[in-house]
Each structure stands twice: as structure tokens, then as C-alpha cells.
Image (cartoon, rainbow, N blue to C red):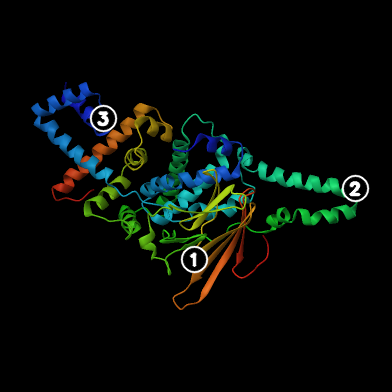
Amino acid sequence: MNCETVQEWIQRDMDNELNPREEEALYEHLADCPDCMKKYDAMKRISWELERLPRVSPPAGLVDELLPHLEQPSPDREGSSKKAEPELWNKKVRWWWIGAAGTAASLLMAIWLVPIFPSEWETSSVPSSTKPAQESGPDPSEKGTGTIQSNETGLPESDQKGKSDSPSGDSTASPSGQFLAAVEGNRVVVRDQGEEVYRSSSWKPASDVKLEWRSDRSLRVEIHRKSKSGERSGEVLLIDPVSGEEIQQPLGEQTGG
Amino acid sequence: MIEESWVRRAQEGDRKALIRLLRKVEAPVYRTAYYILGDEQDAKDASQDALLRIYRRFSTFRGDSKVETWAQRIAIRAAIDLTRKRTRTLPLAEEAGAKLDRGLGSSVERSGIASDIRQAIRRLPESQRTAVILRYLQDYTYDEIAEAMDLPLNTVKSHLFRGRKKLREWLADYKEGGVIP
């Protein structure tokens, strides 16, 4: 075995790509060749340093910030990419078709139909999740039924970095028991028999989050914040886990459902 | 590991499955972009660009490779596109190094040598840098690196080996009291 081959084997050894026999042959050579041994040690050192490089985490809300862009069909979109949207589109077309069938009978009938599909028509005019989250929320420290108490003021951003959302284990069931909603970090996740069916947009750190199911198709999430001066603010998310609709309102408005 | 059922649903145009998938790949995408570019803001821009590309091109994903390596391929492309754009406006290596240092900020514990290694990585040629990043920051095997870089196995091995050899030589100089060139 010559020193040139050994250099390649040293490299492969760093990646655990040598079989036991090759390993043995390599170590035998190294024992007899101080020059190769020196290179081996140096390589081991750099490999060790590389393995210890920090696994940097992205800022919270990277995908959330993109959501509005993903919903708008853009003119420069590649032809092949259109596939991502037809389902959403078809759904709307289907509703219109049903509406149109009604209209065909009489205009009166169509007017009567309007209240039946309000949520579908509202959604198209409501801009989707908007605020990019600045940081992920702290893990809940106290648990109550449907209410998660979290850090009063929110930790400084530097303390939050690298933290990932973790399930709180505190779930609220929908009226039929089909869905379980839980606050995970700074968003709410809805599961159907353990399988995630909906993940909300993330919110800014809150002091208190309340979950309330109004029906299986309507989850109300109240997000409360209290500033250091004691000023209260917050917002309400109305979520339909089936259609994936999410409407955000300022706290205090009691509309929608 | 991303569940196959999600991938299938995303391929069929299920927007929610696709967004869920984006959330799964955002961290590894960002990490690669960060180490290619060496700056948090640039890494964020490149990651978002990559995530958009993934979203828009997902119907072209044929499942010949793992979705993770396919996403990495797009992340590498987006980061390198941005590097080239930046190189035109920021030709000085010193500035790139300074950006890298600043980029890590207070969020990551730093030691002198680790910081120098990050700078040294940035000075490797693109292909060698990418191979080193995929091996050490994504824990990829040779096969996975080849998939992500869309290059033959022997070529990526050669990029990885050459890059690592250069780093070893620089580190040896560094230990002898010099600075990484």
C-alpha cells in the first residue's frame, strides 16, 4: 500500500466509508509511516472541527412570510408549477357551479343561496396570514383546560433562537371529539386521530392563548398580550381545520365563526 | 424523514401538504444557504427563494431522489445564484469574512478556530464548499451528496476530498501561528 492510496483511504475513513479490512490495512500503514500518521491526525482534527460547526436555525416564520406569495398565482410562474393550485381553484369553481345551478331556476333562489356559502365567499376576500412571527413562543409552563399560560412578556429574541416548537401535550377536543387542537410554540396544531390536519400561521409571543371549539368546523383561538405598561392587546384566529381557512380578527370583535 | 403520503399529496397539488413539506425542509435549506453565503440575511433571502422554487416546481419532482436531497439541490442553486450576485457587488474576501463573523451574532457560541473554519469554508471553490457543507452540516452520505449536487459519485468524492485537504492544510498553517489564507 503506497502513501498516495493511503491519502484517499484517510479521507474515506473520515466518512466511515472503509470496510473493516481496509481499516486494518490503513492503521497498519499508519503505524509504520510517521508522515502519513501526521496527515491522518491533521485530517482527523479538521474533520472533528467541521462536525462541531453550529447547526444554525432559521428565523421563525420563514414559511409563514411566504404564504401570501404562495396563494397568489404569479404571471412569471413556470408552466409546470400550476399544479399546486388547481385543487383550490376547482373547489371554488365547484361552488360557483352549484350556485349557478341554483340561479338557473330563479334569481330569487340564488339570493336565498347566499347565506349557505358565506364562509367560502368571505375567504376569497380575506387576505391570508399576514404577520411574520419574530420569534417562536416559549414552551407553556402552566397548563389549564384550553388555556395555555406562557411567558408574560416574551423572552428576548436571542434566548429564543434555535428553539423548535414542541407539543404542549395540552389538547382541546372538538365537540364531536374528532379533532384535537393544541398550542405548540406560537401556533396551533389540529390533529385528527394523531395525524396533523392543520397548522396555523404563527403569532407573536403572547401571554395567554385560549382555544375554543364552536363546532367541528370552527376553532376560535384567542391570543392575548400584555405589554410591560399593562396595556392589553391581541387577536382572534378563526380556523376551519377541514377547509384550512384561517381568518384573523382584532381581539374584541365577536363576528364570524 | 418526510412521509411518503405527504409527498404524494403534495405532488397531486394538495397545497396544505406542500406547505407542510416546506416547513419540514426549511431548517436544512436555511443551514445550507447560511454556510454557503455566510450571512443571516442573505441566508434568509436565499432560503425563501429556494422554498418558493420548491413550491412552484414541486410538480416536476419525480421521486427519483429523496425529497430532502431534491430540496437541497434547489437550496444550493438559490444560494449560489445569490453568491454570484453578491460577488459582483462585494469582491473583497475580507468583507465576506467580516459578514460571516457578524452573521453568527450572539446566538451561537463561537470559538476562534470555529470562526476561522467557517471563513475557510467560504473560500473553497463552490463545488468543494458545497460537498463539505452537505457532508458535515447535513450529515449526507456520498450517494446523498451526489443526488443533491446532481453529479456523479466519483466527482463529489473528489470535491469533498479536495476541499477537506485544503482545509487541513490551512488549519496546519493556522496552528503554526499563521492565518488562514
Write down the residue under mark 3.
A12
Amino acid under disc 1: Asp
Q: Are marks 1 and 3 on the same chain?
A: yes
**Secondary structure state at the residue bearing disc 1:** strand
Mark 3 crowd level (few <14, some 14–19, many ≥20, 10 Å Cα)? some
- Left/right placement of residue A247 relative to residue B108 reads right
Q: Earlier in the sequence, mark 1 or mark 2?
A: 2
Mark 2 chain: A
Mark 3 belongs to chain: A
Assign the N terminus of chain A to one quadrant of the image.
top left
Q: CA distance from mark 1 to mark 3?
A: 53 Å
In this view, the mark in front (1 or 2): 1
Name the residue at 58% across, 57% down: A129
**In the depicted view, which residue is nearer to us: A129 or B130?**
A129
> Same chain for marks 2 and 3?
yes
State if disc 2 and disc 1 touch (CB < 8 Å). no
Q: Quadrant of the C terminus of chain A?
A: bottom right
**Image mark for residue A208:** 1
Question: Which element carries disc 2, helix, strand or loop?
Answer: helix
* Label 1 to label 2: alpha-carbon separation: 50 Å
Disc 2 target residue: A105
| x then y, percent, for residue A159 | 35, 61
For disc 1, the neighbor class at 10 Å (few under 14, some 14 to 19, many from 20) is: some
Residue type at mark 2?
Ala
Residues at marks 1 and 2 on the same chain: yes
Mark 1 or 3: the one toward you: 1
